[in-house]
Image (cartoon, rainbow, N blue to C red):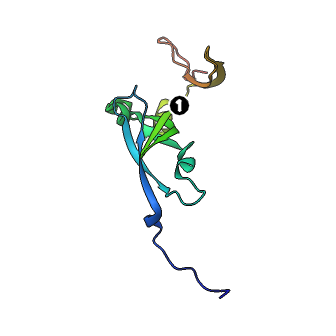
């Protein structure tokens, strides 16, 4: 029939779990799991996994709670069996940490620059700075 409904199937039955492996320079290399549809016909599961970006707390990777405000982005480069081998993609602060750094009556200075390393990798570095009161300052503002 033309208007016949498709047979309802459980969507989780066609999914597979993969382990996310962080680079070796972190203390803990297994940092999570992710789902992907099974390989079916020309749709290969590893193609959907490559390039995925995962955001993990540095406290979880290094097992150090003092670094909980740093978020590490890992990008999937390679699939080996049921393991995703990831590489460093970036780092950022949590929003609550950034808000706690900003104070009243102080200026916020932000800058960014693209740096090219000797091996040809381009890094974009973001810098954040704040003005500071002088010990004998009488003025309320520090601009």
Q: Which residue is more in the foreground, 18 or 128?
A: 18
Disc 1 marks which residue?
104
Would residue 133 be seen by someone viewing this image from the given angle? Answer: yes
Q: Position of residue 137 (x, y in %)?
A: 52, 14
Q: Is residue 72 left or right of residue 31?
A: right
Q: Callout 1: few (<14), some (14-19), or many (20+) C-alpha neighbours within 10 Å?
A: few
Coordinates of residue 28 in the picture (x, y in percent): 34, 33
Residue 43, placed above or below residue 86? below
Residue 63 image-quadrant placement = top left
User: Of residues 8 and 90, which is closer to you in this image?
Assistant: 8
As rendered, which of 95 and 64 lies closer to the eye?
64
Tag 1's secondary structure?
A: loop
Quarter of the image with the C terminus in it:
top right
Horizontal side of residue 59 vs 97, given as left or right: left
Q: Where is residue 101 in the image (x, y as percent from the top left)?
A: 48, 30
Total count of labels: 1
Residue under the point 50% across and 36% down? 73
- Residue located farthest toward the top when viewing the structure as drawn: 136
User: Among all residues in the image, which is located at the extreme bottom?
Assistant: 1
Q: In this view, does 115 lie above or below 2?
A: above
Residue under the image location 57 percent in, 21 percent down = 142
**Where is residue 22 shown, x and y percent of the image?**
42, 35
The answer, for residue 93, to whether it is visible in the render is no
In the image, residue 31 above or below residue 2: above
């Amino acid at each position: 029939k033309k208007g016949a409904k498709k047979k309802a199937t459980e969507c989780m039955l066609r999914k597979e779990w993969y382990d996310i492996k962080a680079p070796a320079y972190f203390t803990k290399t297994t940092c999570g799991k992710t789902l992907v549809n099974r390989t079916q016909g020309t749709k290969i599961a590893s193609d959907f996994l490559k390039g995925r970006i995962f955001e993990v707390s540095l406290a979880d990777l290094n097992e150090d709670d003092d670094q909980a405000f740093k978020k590490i982005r890992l990008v999937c480069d390679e699939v080996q069996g049921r393991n995703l081998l990831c590489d460093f993609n970036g780092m950022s602060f949590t929003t609550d940490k950034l808000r706690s750094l900003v104070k009243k009556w102080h200026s916020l200075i932000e800058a960014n620059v693209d740096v090219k390393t000797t091996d040809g990798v381009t890094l974009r570095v973001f810098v954040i700075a704040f003005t500071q009161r002088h010990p004998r300052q009488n003025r309320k503002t520090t601009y």
